[in-house]
């Protein structure tokens, strides 16, 4: 806000300049208080809505630096493409989107700090956070504020404990269940080992549901080997156990950094086994100093494949590669779909930017079970939502071939 002061207001009367200094300071204090109050009213709005009454302010949070940077950077970039498309097409019901993304380095405390920073900016809707553990911390804040939140990729069911939060990605139970079903239906193995991170809610949540579904389907889990964030550099013990138990496939509900170490160590052992993972493995081909030849044949469950030939995917991949010089992964597609999810909810609810954060949150949350978008990650049936916050969409599987993700 810029305030122009008239000559009368800015000229201090002669008697104040020459008189008592205390009187002058009090007069100046009263004047400055009035200016600041006017600024607050103009910037915040009496209803607690946007700083710009014709703009929806959408914030995003995720890691753009650190070990998980590929996830947050992809979400940030995919969402930006969606924002640009919507604004160029006239906005949402005539209102433009202002979009700002904050780095949280995949750290819960930093994610809360990022949330507070975006609130200071004037955020009305949160698209984030990207990774699960930080998101669990932030959802408590959005609940307190009544802010509508769509997470593109945080998959734990803890994320959607509150009625104001919705997921674009599969929840951990769905990923674990769908992975077991796919392995069984495709006859990929009868004896399976699992290596998972017991200190991570994403990894342990998927493992729990995978094990239960595998048992139901008659898949034999011959080894379930855990590690923690403090012991993620040497997996020789876990691999030896899987090998000695005759595992034909190792299920990896983990992130790509640890997976690259496991693949390297399995190769050095001469252990030739199939590997199958979930969305956390998306990024494996971008690990620095990793021999990507070792990733050949790795399979993962994902709702997006950049080599798909449908018009929407082809257009998105073209825009992404032109803007960012790389092929988009699932997380970029999740970010893109998250913005279009918010757009659909706004249109369904008929809300406007001058509404308060809590008014927006209530209306948008109520609209979610009524919307459907086609999206990049929804397959032919698109994406719909339960009132619980969980998304409904069809899973896909891809395999790494020739240094690229290829649909199975």
Image (cartoon, rainbow, N blue to C red):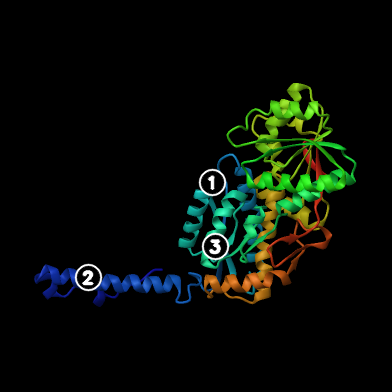
| Residue drawn where x is 61% and y is 32% of the image | 231
Q: N-terminal of the two: label 1 or label 2?
A: 2
Quadrant containing the N terminus in the rendered view: bottom left
Give the image quarter of residue 335. Answer: bottom right
Q: Is residue 201 above or below residue 40?
A: above
Which x, y percent locates residue 160? Answer: 64, 60
Per the rendering, the mark at residue 142 is 3
Q: Secondary structure at mark 3?
A: helix
Q: Is residue 230 above or below residue 210?
A: above
Residue shown at 79% from the left, 33% from the top: 296
| Marks 3 and 1, how far apart at CA | 17 Å
Q: Which SS class for mark 2? A: helix
In-front residue for pair 207/370: 207
Q: CA distance from mark 2 to mark 3?
A: 39 Å
Image height of 172 relative to 253, above or below: below
235 to the left or right of 407: left
Task: Tell me which numbered mark, 2 or 3, is placed earlier along the sequence.
Answer: 2
Between disc 2 and disc 3, the foreground one is 3
Which residue is rendered at x = 56% and y = 66% of the image?
A: 147
Q: Is residue 291 visible?
A: no
Count of numbered badges drawn on the protein: 3
Quadrant that contains the C terminus? top right
Could you tell me how far apart the alpha carbons at marks 1 and 2 are, in whole angstroms? 44 Å
Q: Name the mark on residue 107.
A: 1
Q: Residues within 10 Å of mark 3 (few under 14, many from 20)?
A: many
- Secondary structure of residue under mark 1: loop
Of the residues under marks 3 and 1, which one precedes in the sequence?
Answer: 1
Q: Position of residue 361 (x, y in %)?
A: 58, 70
Return the residue at label 2. Answer: 28
Q: Is residue 364 among what the camera can see?
A: yes
Instruction: Examine the rendered structure and indicate whether residue 385 appears above or below residue 117.
Output: below
Q: Position of residue 333 (x, y in %)?
A: 71, 53
């Amino acid at each position: 806000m810029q305030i122009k002061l008239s000559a009368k207001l800015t000229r201090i009367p002669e008697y104040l300049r020459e008189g008592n200094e205390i009187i002058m300071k009090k007069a100046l204090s009263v004047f400055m208080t009035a200016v600041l109050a006017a600024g607050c009213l103009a910037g915040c709005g009496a209803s607690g809505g946007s700083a710009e009454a014709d703009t929806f302010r959408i914030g995003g949070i995720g890691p753009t630096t650190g070990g998980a940077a590929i996830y947050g950077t992809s979400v940030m970039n995919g969402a930006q493409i969606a924002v640009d498309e919507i604004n160029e097409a006239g906005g949402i019901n005539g209102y433009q989107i202002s979009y700002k993304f904050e780095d949280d380095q995949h750290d819960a405390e930093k994610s809360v700090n990022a949330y507070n920073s975006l609130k200071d900016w004037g955020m009305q809707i949160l698209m984030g956070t990207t990774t699960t553990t930080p998101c669990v911390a932030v959802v408590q804040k959005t609940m307190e504020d009544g802010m509508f939140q769509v997470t593109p990729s945080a998959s734990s069911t803890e994320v959607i404990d509150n009625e104001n939060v919705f997921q674009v990605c599969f929840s951990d139970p769905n990923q674990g269940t769908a992975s077991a079903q796919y392995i069984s239906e495709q006859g990929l193995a009868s004896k399976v080992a699992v290596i998972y991170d017991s200190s991570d809610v994403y990894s342990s949540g998927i493992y729990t549901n995978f094990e239960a579904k595998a048992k139901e389907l008659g898949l034999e889990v011959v080894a379930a080997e855990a590690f923690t964030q403090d012991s993620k550099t040497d997996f020789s013990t876990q691999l030896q156990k899987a090998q000695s138990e005759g595992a034909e496939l190792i299920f990896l509900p983990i992130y790509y950094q640890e997976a690259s170490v496991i693949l390297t160590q399995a190769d050095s052992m001469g252990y030739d086994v199939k590997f199958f993972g979930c969305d956390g493995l998306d990024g494996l081909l971008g690990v620095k100093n990793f021999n990507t030849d070792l990733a050949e044949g790795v399979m993962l469950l994902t709702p997006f494949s950049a080599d798909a030939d449908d018009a929407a995917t082809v257009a998105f991949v073209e825009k992404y590669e032109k803007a960012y010089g790389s092929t988009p992964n699932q997380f970029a597609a999740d970010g893109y779909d998250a913005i279009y999810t918010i757009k659909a909810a706004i249109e369904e609810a008929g809300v406007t930017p001058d509404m308060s954060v809590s008014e927006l949150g209530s209306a948008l949350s109520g609209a979610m079970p009524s919307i459907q978008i086609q999206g990049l990650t929804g397959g032919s049936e698109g994406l719909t939502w339960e009132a619980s916050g969980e998304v409904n969409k069809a899973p896909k599987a891809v395999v790494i071939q020739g240094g690229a993700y290829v649909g199975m």
